[in-house]
Amino acid sequence: MSTHHSHVYIIDDDRAFGKSLKRLLTCKGIPADYFVSAQLFLDAVPSGQQGIAIIDLHMPGLDGFSLIGMMRELHYTMPAIIVTGQTEADSRDMAIRKGAAGFLQKPFNEASLVELIESFNNEHLLEY
């Protein structure tokens, strides 16, 4: 397992989920910040910042797909993992087409998320 963890940015309008995920990652030694909206994330995290973004698909304002598009336009190089509680059949394919580096359906196994984060750490952060 990698000893260095990239910073994780959680963007999800579900405050209970976002705070819980931040606590989980922090307990696993993975530094994390939580944002309740895409705009708050964009306002706080500069495009040159390294890390991994975990983005909820369905949010008011900028949804997950729109946020990934904005990140590409603004030259963010961090990989994005889309998470959703919805069961649309084509969400995973659409997420990958839009530029997501990963996709998880809520509720997901915490080990699956940590393993996905580790895979990015071990590849020294993939770029879009």
Image: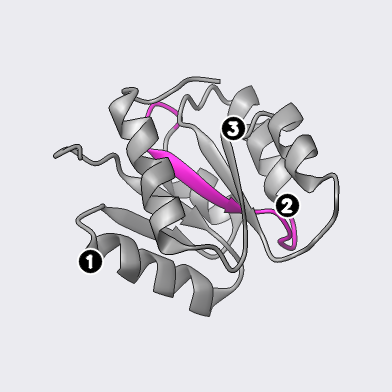
Q: Percent from the top left, x then y, of residue 120?
A: 38, 32
3 left or right of 71 in image: left
User: Mark 3 packing: few (<14 Cα in 10 Å), some, or many (20+)?
Assistant: some
Q: How is the image coloured?
A: one colour
Camera sees residue 32: yes
Q: Is residue 2 above or below residue 15?
A: above
**C-alpha gap between disc 1 and disc 3:** 28 Å
In which image quadrant can residue 99 be found?
A: top right
Between 39 and 52, the one lying in front of the other is: 52
Q: Secondary structure at mark 2?
A: loop
Q: Quadrant of residue 6?
A: top left
Q: Disc 2 versus disc 3: distance between alpha carbons?
A: 12 Å
Kindly identify which residue carries mark 2. Answer: 63
The three-letter amino acid code for the residue at tag 2 is Asp
Q: Nearer the viewer, mark 1 or mark 3?
A: 1
**Amino acid at pointer 3:** Met
119 shown above or below 123: below
State the quadrant of the N terminus. top left
Q: Residue at x 55, y 43 (%)?
A: 81
Closer-to-camera residue (109/84): 109
Q: Earlier in the sequence, mark 1 or mark 2?
A: 1
Residues shaded magenta: 47-63
- Circle 1 is placed at which residue position? 27
Residue 113 in the image: state x and y as whole percent: 44, 52
**Which type of secondary structure does the marked residue at label 1 adopt?**
helix
* Mark 3 lies on residue: 71
